[in-house]
Image (spheres, rainbow, N blue to C red):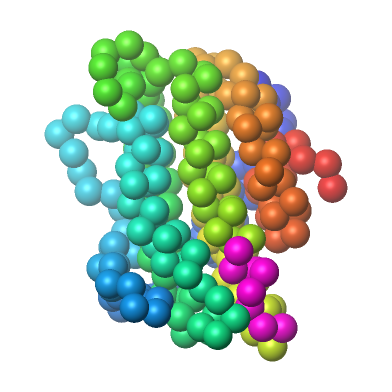
Amino acid sequence: MLSFSALSVVATLAFSAFTSAMPLDPTSAVSTVGNLLPVPALPVGVPALKRDTPRSVAAIVADVTVQVTPYVEQLKYINKQNATLEVIEPVVTNIKGVFASAVVEVQGLMGLSADVILAPVTGTVAVTVAELAQIIAGLLTLVFEVVGVVLGVVDSSILSCVTYLLVSLAELVGCLVCAIVMLVDGILANLVATIVPLIGAIIPIILQLNVLIVIKIFGIAL
């Protein structure tokens, strides 16, 4: 469990990152790479839809994974020939919109009972720290691995612009993780410590982007 002072630092970073990384262009309706079918844009920068029954953390993260996977698949088709800012930016903007909505939804769980917060994706038994860590680590790996792919193929002439764009995405990912950690702190011990061994493969990408909020949350050595 993070100390109170560490949580305060991370929360400050998260607030700053969230406000600066929020998608600003709600008009990016579709994004297409090569001959892929266009994927409709999700609402950008708007709160999650209200539900009769609040979704649990695990359900929210699992749904984010489902929503961003088509966009991630598009980015996997990026190559040196089509790796332009015009192709990459709309896809990344759509992914950011999914994460922004998820952050708001997780924050909306503050003050609710542990039964709601830790409800499983399926079944009736509360999610364990190992299960939630696996779901979160899977999402982190999905996103940061494709970020690494994009960084590896873009031309040096646009690398700084693309890097800036991907950093803003990574900051929103960190905001979601921070919101989850702060939400479950005190009711689900050792979540961060359980996630860290599962994300070893993407730590070099996190360090390459120098995403401070993610680095601070997971205590990654610089």
Q: Is residue 153 found inside the magenta-colored segment of the image?
A: yes
Find residue 133 and report its horizontal and vertical position in percent: 53, 28
Viewer-proximal residue, 120 or 200? 200
Viewer-proximal residue, 1 or 170? 170
Q: How many marks?
A: 0
Q: Quadrant of residue 191?
A: top right
Give the main secondary structure, helix, strand or loop, of the magenta stretch: helix
Instruction: Say which residue appears at 59% left-offset and 54% top-offset.
Output: 145
Find residue 169 and report its horizontal and vertical position in percent: 54, 61
Instruction: Say which residue appears at 55% left-offset and 85% top-offset.
Output: 81
Q: Is residue 126 left or right of residue 143?
A: left
Q: Is residue 9 left or right of residue 174?
A: right
Outermost residue toward the bottom in this view: 157
Find residue 204 and report its horizontal and vertical position in percent: 74, 51
- The span shown in magenta is 149-156
Residue 139 in view in this figure: yes
Q: Is residue 68 left or right of residue 192?
A: left
Find residue 159 and report its horizontal and vertical position in percent: 68, 79
207 above or below 217?
below
Instruction: Say which residue appears at 36% left-offset and 58% top-offset.
Output: 70
Q: Is residue 36 found inside the magenta-colored segment of the image?
A: no
Q: Quadrant of the N terminus?
A: top right
Viewer-proximal residue, 115 or 108? 115
Instruction: Say which residue appears at 42% left-offset and 61% top-offset.
Output: 73
